[in-house]
Amino acid sequence: MSPSAPFGTGLVGESIVLASASASRRAMLAAAGVRFEAVPARIDERALEAEMARGGRIDWVEGDFARLQVRELSAQFIASYLDAEWPAVAGCVGCFRIEGPGVQLFERAIGDQFTVLGMPLFPVLGALRERGVLVP
C-alpha cells in the first residue's frame, strides 16, 4: 500500500460506489478509510438494508436494527431544539442527528450506533474484506 493510501483500503482496484445521498453514510465510510464514489440513488433511502452488487446483480444484503427510546419532551425543549437544528435536520430520518444535539431527545439506545446513523458499518466492512476490496 502506498503511503498516501487511506488505512484499510485494498489494492485490488475494485471501485466502491455508495449509492446514497446520505452525508452520514459518506462520513462513516470516509472515517473508516474506505475509498468510494458517492452516486446518490433516486429512491427513498429511509428503510433500506445495506446491499452490495457485482456485475449488476445484488449478491450481498445485510439488515440491522436499533431501538431508540424517546424521553419525555417538553414543548419548550422541542421548540428550542427545532430552532437550533432546523433546517439541518429536515432531511434526516426522524428529524434528528444523534451525533449532535438530537442525542438529547433520547434516554436509551439499543443496538449499534452505526446502524442508528444509517448503515450497519461492521458487516459492510467485513463484506468488503471478504471480497478483497479492503485489506483483511
Image (spheres, rainbow, N blue to C red):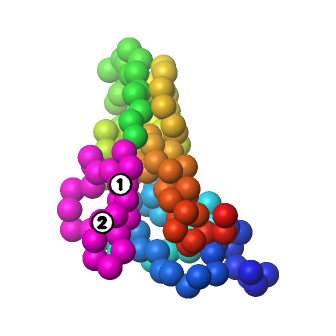
Label 1 residue SS = strand
Residue 77 occupies which quadrant of the picture? top left
Residue type pointed to by label 1: Val
Q: Are marks 2 and 1 in contact (CB under 8 Å)?
A: yes
Residue 124 placement (x, y as % from top left): 49, 56
The dot on residue 131 is: none
Residue at the image position 37 percent from the left and 59 percent from the top: 60
Q: Nearer the viewer, residue 97 or 15?
A: 15
The residue identified by callout 1 is 61
Residue farthest along the left direction in this orientation: 43
**Left or right: residue 30 compared with residue 55:** right
Residue type pointed to by label 2: Ile
**Is residue 49 inside the magenta stretch?**
yes
The dot on residue 58 is: 2
Label 2 residue SS = strand
**Left or right: residue 65 compared with residue 99:** left
Residue 9 visible in the shown view: yes
Residue 98 placement (x, y as % from top left): 48, 39
**Is residue 94 inside the magenta stretch?**
no
Mark 2, other Cα within 10 Å: few <14 / some 14–19 / many ≥20: few
Magenta-highlighted residues: 41-63
User: Which of the image's four quarters has the C terminus?
Assistant: bottom right
